Structure formats: structure tokens, C-alpha cells
């Protein structure tokens, strides 16, 4: 049987130092790369659909899907075709010139999300940084907040990225330690506490930035009624509501935007991860024209933001989402996922949270740590990752079958069940 390692060797330039096994690749990583991640000891060489294959030919179920960047699975044929076709035409122009994919991508993404204007960027953190800049400029120019005095209210346990400004309002000490001085202008309140939010909003509040579901915190869904109350408080104060849908958006929870579950509309949304189809980094801020319209030429930009390759892949992503198939899959398979996981509560699991095909599983005290459970799952052919010590994050690709989903859940039950 030909493995991915064999294919790689056949198509790569020969090298006497080329690694041959998992340990060799990991040793290379440890020697030459910065240790800002702690990956599981698996070296992936190929992937298709909901599975990946390592350099030694072992196949695994992908139960993380790139933190929702791979909602459509690995190498979805429609996305590969779009990328391949564009690779044969033009990949980058910079925004110094127009190109024939840009306006189409912006229009189609706006139509999908029910918004009016699109600001394409690359990474999720860039999208959040862009939304912060837009909100501050809007506050100064439209709301009348004095320059330099605009404030943004954020939630505790948030995760919006790791740039200096963003970690300035993180409550995760690992994200903040030794990275100061920090950017001012942010007020942190407990997630899900509408009273605390109301107390924090002032005349200088430009925006409230919130995740409809907190992914990094353990797939935390806020209390019923919280998000509509956030919308009401923003309207009352003349402040913008910015929804970070980088992980929760694009059908992960069963709707195009997770806020739809609450019947709420934001003024700005940040999108990313799945928008690039797992092929190229694509992000965007989408929202109201009168808000995004405060930006003028020269005030913000990105050389690669909205490049032809990104737009071609992004358009293919929008076409896939527009069929409704992935929303239905996330809903139906999500119900199955949560029904089965709920049965583990009291049997090695203390709590399960989530929405759609997305769940946080808290391992009960006395059980394995999240890291130990992740390593044992890898040994059983399932890849996922822990957060906050004892929580497993479950986010398989939306193309996963029910049988594959059951196989992954069976493995979780075997590892943490008691």
C-alpha cells in the first residue's frame, strides 16, 4: 500500500537528511521552530474529508477540524477546483489594482450574511483588529466621542486572537504574561452577565465585542436572553455590537451566523477560519455600510487581504454555504452529537456544552487530564485537543458521517467513561 510518506518521497527533492518517521519530523520541529504550540505527537501528511493520514500511513478521524477552519473537511473537491483554477490565472495583485474576483466575493459574502459591506483581511486576529479600528473611528466621527477616549466593552474568558492589542483585554494569563505594556481602552465584564455589561457602558463606549459562543473557553453558550439584552443595551447607548463569529460562524452551529439562534443582528461581524476553506487564510469584517464606510483610502489595508486566490476560494465557500446543506448537517449531526455526549454526564464527564456540531466536554475530577485524554484518543485513531486543563473541544468537519461521528464518540466514551 502506498502511503503519504511514499508519495512525498517520490515528489520531493532527495536529501540525505530527509526525515523518515514521526520522531524525526517532531525532532526537526523541536529544533528549528519556536515552541509556541504543544501539538500532539502525530505528523500529518495527507487528508480527505473528515480523516487525516500521518507519515507512517495511520488514518485518524479529525475531531478538531482546524478549530473550525476545516468546516468542509480536508480537500473538498469544489474548493480544490476553485483554488486550482485561480492558481492558473493570477494569485496576487495587491489592492493597488482592481481584480475580477474581488467585488464578486464581497457582494456574495454580504448577501450570504445579510450585510451591506465587506472588508476582507487574512487572519481572524486581523479581522478583530480591523473591527476595533473601525469602531473607534466611527465613535469619533459619528457618535462624537473625543479622539482617544473611545472604549470597547469585552467579555471575560474571551478569545479574539493574540496580537498585542487583543491580548490587552484577555483574561488568560498565558496570553498576557510578559507581553505588556498593554493597549488601553477596554472594559472587561463577566461573560453572560447583562447587569455587569449595563454598568460598564458609558457615553464613551464605542462598541461591545462578544463571541456568541465562546470557543476557546470551552464552547460556552451564554444564558438564554443574554445576547438579545446585549443588543438592547447597545441600541440604548448608541454603541455598536460586534459579534466575533470567526469560530462560531459559517454554519458550525447550524446557522450561517450563530447570532441567528437568538434572533439578533450585529452591526459588525468578524469572520475567518472556514471562510478560507482550509486552503488559504481568509477573514473579513462584514456589516453596516454607514459603519464600515468611515474608512477612507490610506487609513487601513493589507497587501494580501482580498487577493484573487483568497476571493476565488471564498466565493466557492459561499456557494457551498448557500445551498443550506451544511447548516442542515450541523443541525442534524449536532443533535446526535449532543444526545450521545449527554449520556456520558455522570460517567466520567461532569458537563457538556455547545451548539450545533460543536461541543465542550468537561472531564470529571479523578479522570484523565485533557492532555492525557487527547493523547489516548490519538492512540485510538481520533484527533482532538484540550483546553483549560480538563475540557475536550469537539468540532469535527461538517462533512463527517454519522457512523464516523459515532466512532469518535465511542472513543471518547472509552477514554473518559467511568
Image (cartoon, rainbow, N blue to C red):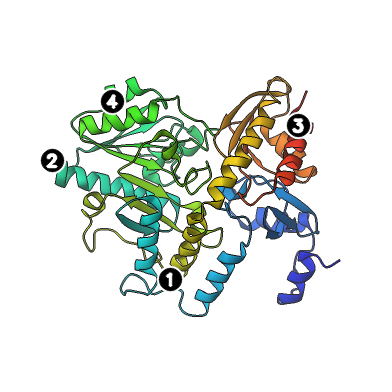
Q: Earlier in the sequence, mark 3 or mark 4?
A: 4
Front label number (1 vs 4)? 1
Question: Where, quadrant-wise, is the C terminus in this rendering?
Answer: top right
What separation in Å lies between label 4 and label 2 (alpha carbons)?
19 Å
Density class for disc 1 (Cα within 10 Å; few <14, some 14-19, many ≥20) is: many
319 vs 169, left or right, is: right
**Which residue is more in the foreground, 172 or 104?**
104
What separation in Å lies between label 1 and label 3 (alpha carbons)?
45 Å
Q: Which residue is mark 4?
A: 200
Density class for disc 2 (Cα within 10 Å; few <14, some 14-19, many ≥20) is: some
**Which residue is more in the foreground, 108 or 168?**
108
Density class for disc 4 (Cα within 10 Å; few <14, some 14-19, many ≥20) is: some
Q: Which residue is mark 2?
A: 144
What separation in Å lies between label 1 and label 4 (alpha carbons)?
42 Å
Front label number (3 vs 4)? 3
Q: Earlier in the sequence, mark 4 or mark 2?
A: 2
Q: Secondary structure at mark 3?
A: helix
Q: Position of residue 134 (x, y in %)?
A: 27, 49
Q: Position of residue 402 (x, y in %)?
A: 70, 44
Q: Earlier in the sequence, mark 2 or mark 3?
A: 2
Figure check: 375 above or below 134 = above
Q: Secondary structure at mark 1?
A: helix
Q: Earlier in the sequence, mark 1 or mark 2?
A: 2
Q: Residue at x 61, y 41 (%)?
A: 332
Q: Position of residue 262 (x, y in %)?
A: 41, 33
Q: Secondary structure at mark 2?
A: loop
Q: Which residue is mark 3?
A: 413
Amino acid at each position: 500500500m502506498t502511503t503519504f510518506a511514499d508519495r512525498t518521497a517520490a515528489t520531493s527533492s532527495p536529501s540525505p537528511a530527509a526525515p523518515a518517521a514521526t520522531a524525526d519530523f517532531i525532532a526537526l520541529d523541536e529544533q528549528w521552530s519556536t515552541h509556541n504550540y504543544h501539538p500532539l505527537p502525530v505528523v500529518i501528511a495527507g487528508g480527505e474529508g473528515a480523516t487525516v493520514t500521518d507519515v507512517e500511513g495511520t488514518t485518524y478521524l479529525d475531531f478538531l477540524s482546524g478549530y473550525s477552519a476545516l468546516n468542509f473537511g480536508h480537500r473538498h473537491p469544489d474548493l480544490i477546483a476553485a483554488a486550482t483554477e485561480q492558481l492558473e490565472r493570477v494569485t496576487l495583485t495587491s489592492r493597488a489594482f482592481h481584480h475580477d474576483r474581488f467585488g464578486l466575493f464581497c457582494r456574495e459574502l454580504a448577501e450570504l450574511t445579510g450585510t451591506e459591506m465587506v472588508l476582507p483581511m487574512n487572519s481572524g486576529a486581523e479581522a478583530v483588529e480591523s473591527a476595533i479600528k473601525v469602531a473607534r473611528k466611527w465613535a469619533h466621527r459619528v457618535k462624537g466621542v473625543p479622539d482617544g477616549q473611545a472604549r470597547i466593552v469585552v467579555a471575560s474568558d474571551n478569545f479574539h486572537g493574540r496580537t498585542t492589542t487583543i491580548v490587552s483585554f484577555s483574561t488568560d494569563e498565558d496570553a498576557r504574561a510578559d507581553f505588556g505594556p498593554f493597549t488601553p481602552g477596554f472594559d472587561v465584564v463577566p461573560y453572560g452577565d447583562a447587569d455587569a455589561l449595563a454598568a460598564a457602558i458609558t457615553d464613551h463606549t464605542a462598541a461591545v465585542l462578544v463571541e456568541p459562543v465562546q470557543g476557546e473557553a470551552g464552547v460556552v453558550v451564554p444564558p438564554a436572553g443574554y445576547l438579545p439584552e446585549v443588543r438592547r443595551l447597545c441600541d440604548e447607548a448608541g454603541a455598536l455590537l460586534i459579534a466575533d463569529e470567526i469560530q462560531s460562524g459559517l454554519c458550525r452551529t447550524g446557522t450561517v451566523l450563530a447570532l441567528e439562534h437568538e434572533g439578533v443582528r450585529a452591526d459588525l461581524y468578524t469572520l475567518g477560519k472556514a471562510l478560507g476553506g482550509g486552503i488559504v487564510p481568509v477573514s473579513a469584517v462584514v456589516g453596516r455600510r454607514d459603519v464600515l464606510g468611515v474608512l477612507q483610502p490610506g487609513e487601513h489595508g493589507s497587501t494580501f487581504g482580498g487577493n484573487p486566490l483568497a476571493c476565488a476560494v471564498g466565493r466557492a465557500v459561499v456557494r457551498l454555504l448557500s445551498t443550506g446543506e451544511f447548516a442542515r448537517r450541523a443541525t442534524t449531526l449536532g443533535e446526535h452529537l449532543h444526545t450521545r455526549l449527554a449520556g456520558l454526564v455522570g460517567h466520567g464527564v461532569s458537563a457538556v456544552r455547545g451548539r450545533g456540531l460543536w461541543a465542550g466536554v468537561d472531564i470529571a475530577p479523578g479522570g484523565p487530564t485533557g492532555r492525557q485524554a487527547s493523547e489516548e484518543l490519538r492512540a485510538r485513531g481520533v484527533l482532538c485537543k484540550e483546553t483549560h486543563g480538563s475540557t475536550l473541544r469537539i468540532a469535527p468537519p461538517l462533512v463527517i458521517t454519522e457512523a464516523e461521528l459515532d466512532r469518535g464518540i465511542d472513543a471518547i466514551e472509552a477514554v473518559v467513561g467511568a
